[in-house]
Image: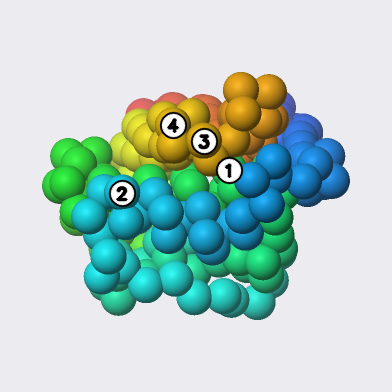
Amino acid sequence: MFGSYLPILILAVALGAITQWFVNSSFRRFSAVPLATGRSGAEVARSMLDAEGLHHVGIEMVSGHLTDHYDPRADVLRLSKDVFQGRTVAAAGVAAHEAGHAVQHARGFLAARARQVLVPTANIGSSLAFPLILGGIFIGLADLIMLGVIFFAGAVLFQIVTLPVEFDASRRALASLNTGNVLPDDQVRGARTVLTAAALTYVAATLVAVLQLLYYLGLARR
């Protein structure tokens, strides 16, 4: 039973390692390329937000590496030090991507709204699914496994909905960087490489999650 799960586990580890390497190597590579305009990541994000009329959205620096995110509850971009202060192609790409999430929130982007609604479902599914599935396996109760599968499906749905949200934020970021003389064309391509690497981590995680869901469904039906 568990032997058939081994290929999924190997795939998860392999994809995780490969995509993480791609993200880190891309970020390091383009962190060594100075931004032609000399702007910091925070300045790039501020310019994009202001161009969208989002003067009220704040920008803060947070600790950690690639811990950048947009907090819709506080309406604040939180950028890691390397992105906030960095005057590089990588910093500009990541900062503009997070600003893209703020624009989505302000414009009521449907997928972003759906993801926000699914946050509680994803949190509950992540914490309850595995205990229920394992409990059902050990006591041989298919209904308990199926209940765990249902919870896990909620977490998988969240990951699926996340994909268009991330892709759209990158699309908005690159469109902004390509206008207003923020980046020349060759540096826009560098920013695209960084954002593509980050997007692949979401694709890989979603693929593994879907395969896990199918595996658990098979267990519940046995």
Distance in Å between CA atoms under marks 3 and 1: 14 Å
Q: Circle 3 sits in a helix, a strand or a loop, which is it?
A: loop
Distance in Å between CA atoms under marks 2 and 1: 16 Å
Residue 217's x, y, as percent? 39, 32
Residue 175's x, y, as percent? 42, 30
Identify residue for label 3. Answer: 181
Q: Amino acid at mark 3?
A: Asn
Q: Amino acid at mark 4?
A: Thr
Residue 34 or 193: which is nearer the viewer? 34
Q: Nearer the viewer, mark 2 or mark 1?
A: 2
Give the crowd class for mark 4: few <14, some 14-19, many >=20 residues within 10 Å.
Answer: few
Identify residue for label 1. Answer: 93
Give the crowd class for mark 1: few <14, some 14-19, many >=20 residues within 10 Å.
Answer: many
Q: Are marks 4 and 1 in contact (CB under 8 Å)?
A: no
| Residue in the image at 60% along x and 48% along y | 92
Q: Earlier in the sequence, mark 2 or mark 1?
A: 2
Residue 115's x, y, as percent? 27, 48
Residue 153's x, y, as percent? 33, 42
Q: Earlier in the sequence, mark 4 or mark 2?
A: 2
Q: Amino acid at mark 1?
A: Gly
Q: Circle 2 sits in a helix, a strand or a loop, which is it?
A: helix
Judged left or right of residue 30, residue 43 is left
Q: Are marks 3 and 1 in contact (CB under 8 Å)?
A: no
Distance in Å between CA atoms under marks 4 and 1: 13 Å
Give the crowd class for mark 3: few <14, some 14-19, many >=20 residues within 10 Å.
Answer: few
Distance in Å between CA atoms under marks 2 and 3: 13 Å
Q: Earlier in the sequence, mark 2 or mark 3?
A: 2
